[in-house]
Image (cartoon, grey):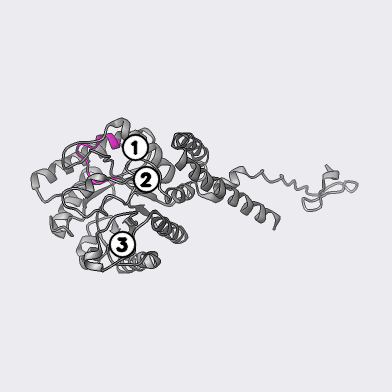
Amino acid sequence: MHEKVGRWGWAVMVLLILVLSSQYFHSHPHAASSFENQAKATLTAIQTAIPTGQLKGMAYGPFREGQSPEQGIYPTLSEVRQDMSLLNLVSNGIRTYGCQHLETVITATREISLPLTLGVWLSGNPEQDSAEIACAVDQAQANPHIASIVVGNESILAGHLTATQVCTYTQQVRESTGLPVTTAEPWHIWVAHSNLATCVDYLLIHIHPYWECQPIENTVAFVQQKFEQVSTQYPDKAVVIGETGWPTAGTGREAHCGPMPALSPEQQSQFAADFLEWAEQEGVDFYYFEAFDEPWKCEGGRSEVECHWGIYGADRAPKLARDLFLLHRLYLPMVVSHYMPPPTPQVQITNPPDNVQVITGEQATASDI
């Protein structure tokens, strides 16, 4: 009983320190880098010794203010390295959405041995799609930290390709790399296209309660319902959540959902807390959407909510939800046990001499030592 109380006391203390630290760093941004370094050191000390065995990944787009794949303006290796130092604190893997011109991401993840699920962007243009696939195959053959390849992201939903065409591409990539291959689509596309499941090694499903008019109070129940629906339909396939999340600002769904409460960082934090608790309890693998706000996604007539999904802002400042991912990445019980004193070794003596009194661990006191 005393040990349990002690551990919870440590847990509360660690949580309080993190919360207070986060508040301090929001008002003292120059001190934030020191905290990140300390947290990274703690993570390095424990993560290899006690892995969680569950994928807790981040969906990653690297584009900052003034950068855009549509404009051909890409981040530098230095910028991506900075991103990886932040993402290594909150996830144990990332997924990307394209291969060409993003070799910096492959380099930066390789340097810190962060598992990468490499994306292949399929647009429906045969020449461009073939170039993307060739890039992914070359990179996968040269980089063993690439764990899987996602051939297409919502290509069927967008009408760029048919399920049969996507299957042809997934088979080509699998044969060329030997890696697990999938494609990413919303949950209802998987439900409607059973033939798609036959040509992937696992299902990567998107579940976005925001776009399906769900109030914040019902979001995680909705995610759970759709996850279980797909899992039940395909009992012989592993199901991974490829995207789920909640934005912090903007509007976008009101046209088909009607009036909705204003978005906020507090709502995102509420969703993240409930989602992480459910995913950890059920052992659900996931990539959270998304790591950073990407300003380019609000350009070109797109809705203003599209660029506000990150747990970090476009300036790489953490939002409220970031601290929750930090806690779950470190896996709080492990951190607590890391700082707890080791148990006293128990010595068992068999067949002691008649004149020797054996004192058990429960009987021993300080005066006996």
Percent of width and height locating residue 312: 37, 45
Relative to 278, say whether 152 is above or below. above
Instruction: Please name the amino acid that badge 2 sits on.
Output: Tyr
Q: Which residue is mark 3?
A: 210
Report crowding for label 3: few under 14, some 14 to 19, many 20 or more residues within 10 A (C-alpha). some
Q: Which residue is mark 2?
A: 312
The front one of 216 and 222 is 216
**Separation (CA) of disc 1 from disc 3:** 30 Å
Quadrant where the N terminus sits is bottom right
Q: Which residue is mark 1?
A: 109
The front one of 26 and 60 is 26
Quarter where residue 104 is shown: top left
CB under 8 Å between callouts 1 and 3? no
Quadrant where the C terminus sits is top right
**Separation (CA) of disc 2 from disc 3:** 19 Å
Asked if residue 28 shows in the view, the reply is yes
- Sequence-first disc among 2 and 3: 3
* Element carrying mark 3: loop
Instruction: Please name the amino acid that badge 1 sits on.
Output: Thr
Q: Is residue 133 located in the magenta-colored stretch of the structure?
A: no
**Separation (CA) of disc 2 from disc 1:** 18 Å
* Element carrying mark 1: helix
The front one of 176 and 125 is 125
Percent of width and height locating residue 294: 27, 45
